[in-house]
Amino acid sequence: MQLIIEEIEFKRIILHVKGVLIGKDKNTQIKFWNEAGGGLLTPTHVEWEGDRFHLWMNVLSINNESPMLPGIYYMGAYNDKKCRCSAELTEGLTFEQDELKDNPVNIVINKGKGHFFRAFSRLNLDNGDYYLDVRCEMPEDPPFFIKKWASRHAKNIKRNLWEITHWISVSEFKHYAKKKKSGNKILFASGSRGEIGGNEEFIYNRLKERGLDKNYEICFDFKPNIDAKRSLFKKYRFTKLLATSDIIFIDDYYPDVYKFDYPKDVKVVQLWHACGAFKSLGFERMDKPGAPPLNTRVHKCYTHMPVSSVHSAWHHAEGFCIDESKFLPIGIARTDVFFDEEYKKKTAEKMYQEFPRAKQAKRVYLYAPTFRGKNALDAFFPFGQVDLNAWGKFLKERDEHLIIKMHPFVKESIKIPGEYKDYISDAFDYREVNDILFIVDVLITDYSSVMYEFSLLRRPMYFYAFDQKMYEASRDFYEKYEDTVPGPIVKRFDQLLVALKEETFDPKRLEGFITKNFTYTDGKATDRVIDEIILK
């Protein structure tokens, strides 16, 4: 038996190895053995085509959702735990032994002193075997405030108070989590909306339609945004709800949920608000601003996450650094409405009441760009890149209407020229962009995931990416932008108006996009979530 490596490459935090295993039998597996006594690691994926293989694994989550332990890892072919042969490089494949960050066979993540992960591809100089040299160090949790109170200064009072309240809430959680649960308590919670909505609302409403709400104790807890402050009573109530619930649904990033260790029989379900695999997130942004620390607790508590496709599952598993088995490609609940003709008709009527000028227009456009900046605190949009006077003139000449829906993080209002108020509407005060889609003929966006939902209507999309290179440098994408978006890309505003006028959209590209990003297009995602997660 001979294991030969033909290609090695790190793509972000995923190690890819391609090669051939000569003499392979059905019981043979490719594994990595930690020379320092860390045991065997099995790659997450190994695809075979005859004797040829392509394996890949997330080096920051392969160790029970944690980074690989420090050590020397030899790659080999194993029958059970017995190594049949070690990996060697194919003739002509070489790589430098130095530690260059831009070397594709290495990964170097430097987060600061005592906080790093590095993995270097090496060759054993004695026998030519390939191995991965892993070095990592995680920051230690600071000692509890009481142990270091004397060394604190007045400026750290806020931190001290946070530690006190954190310790109290964790203690409260542990107290209630020990008590016997009913087995039928469901919590719907969100840290980004003041009332139930989105995927959670669809699941809750469907539970009631099926009469299943009578079988469960259903609780709710919502706050309008991450920064909203809770009273002490509401903090106490929320912690108790988390500790006593059997199934917890959340719909976005929610820091208050991540600080607890949940019992193994509790289901923590992330109903992520976005479809598809588009912008890089979490650990996919390790060399970008806003990337998480290597020992973060964020997202690690999830037990289930419905996604739209296997492609999306790979993306989110990498971004959150949690096991792919937790991702269920059963569909996103709120996309069911795109297959419900009665719902689409009723929602369209509602939207025409909200935007009455759109009903008489020969064509309705929606401009829905994403925000710029790192997060909600510094979010903005460069309005200078959009000439509303030119767009208004374009619309007036063609008797068409434009609805502008900025990302909720962008607080600056749009200044619509008075001459074109009958042709341009601002949807700032309307939360659910999906509702607006049902009266839209053409979508214009940039890097927003709204393109996934809109694709299900099979209508034209255009991508006004005036700052694509800058956005890639600060945020980046899961795959190349040009290979992802299902419509024409324009870089200048005058080019956008020309593209809209000439209707340069290609429907064939859209069909391929839908096939790749949606495992199901049957309008039954909500029922699958209920059947597979709630009803087991």
Image: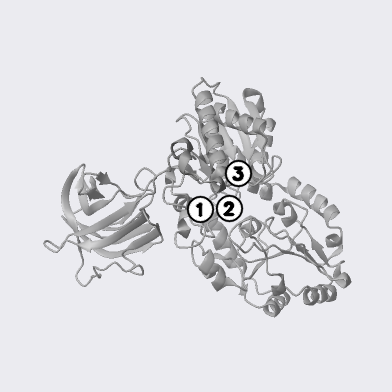
Pointer 3 with pointer 2, Cβ within 8 A: no
Q: From this viewpoint, is residue 374 visible?
A: yes
Q: Nearer the viewer, residue 53 or 277?
A: 277
Drawn side of residue 81 relative to residue 516, left or right: left
Which sits in the foreground, 66 or 345?
Answer: 66
**Residue at image mark 1:** 312
Q: How many marks?
A: 3
Label 3 crowd (10 A; few <14 / some 14-19 / many >=20): many
Question: Are the residues flagged by discs 2 and 1 in contact, CB closer than 8 Å?
Answer: yes
Residue type (three-letter) at the residue carrying disc 3 = Asp
Q: Of circles 1 and 3, which is in front?
A: 3
Residue found at x 67% / y 49%: 339
Where disc 3 sits, the SS reads loop
Seen from the viewer's position, the closer of residues 366 and 188 is: 188
Whole-percent x, y for residue 170 in the image: 51, 32
- Residue 218, given in percent of the width and then of the height, sits at 64, 28
Q: Which residue is mark 2?
A: 275
Q: What crowding class fits label 2: few (fewer than 14 Cα within 10 Å), some (14-19), or many (20 or more)?
A: many
Q: Quadrant of residue 397?
A: bottom right
**Residue 270 visible somewhere in the drawing:** no
Q: Which amino acid type corresponds to the residue marked 1 in the rendered image?
A: Ser
Q: CA distance from mark 3 to mark 2?
A: 12 Å
**Residue 269 picture location, percent across and down:** 54, 39
The mark that comes first in sequence, 2 or 1, is 2
Please identify the quarter of the rendering in which residue 20 is found: bottom left
Of badges 3 and 2, nearer the viewer stands 3
Q: Residue drawn at (54%, 60%), measured in percent from left and top? A: 279
> Label 3 near label 1: C-beta < 8 Å?
no
Which residue does the numbered mark 3 point to in the structure image?
251
- Image height of 307 relative to 11, above or below: above
- How many angstroms separate mark 2 from mark 1 (CA)? 8 Å
Tell which circle, 1 or 3, labels the residue nearer the N-terminal end: 3
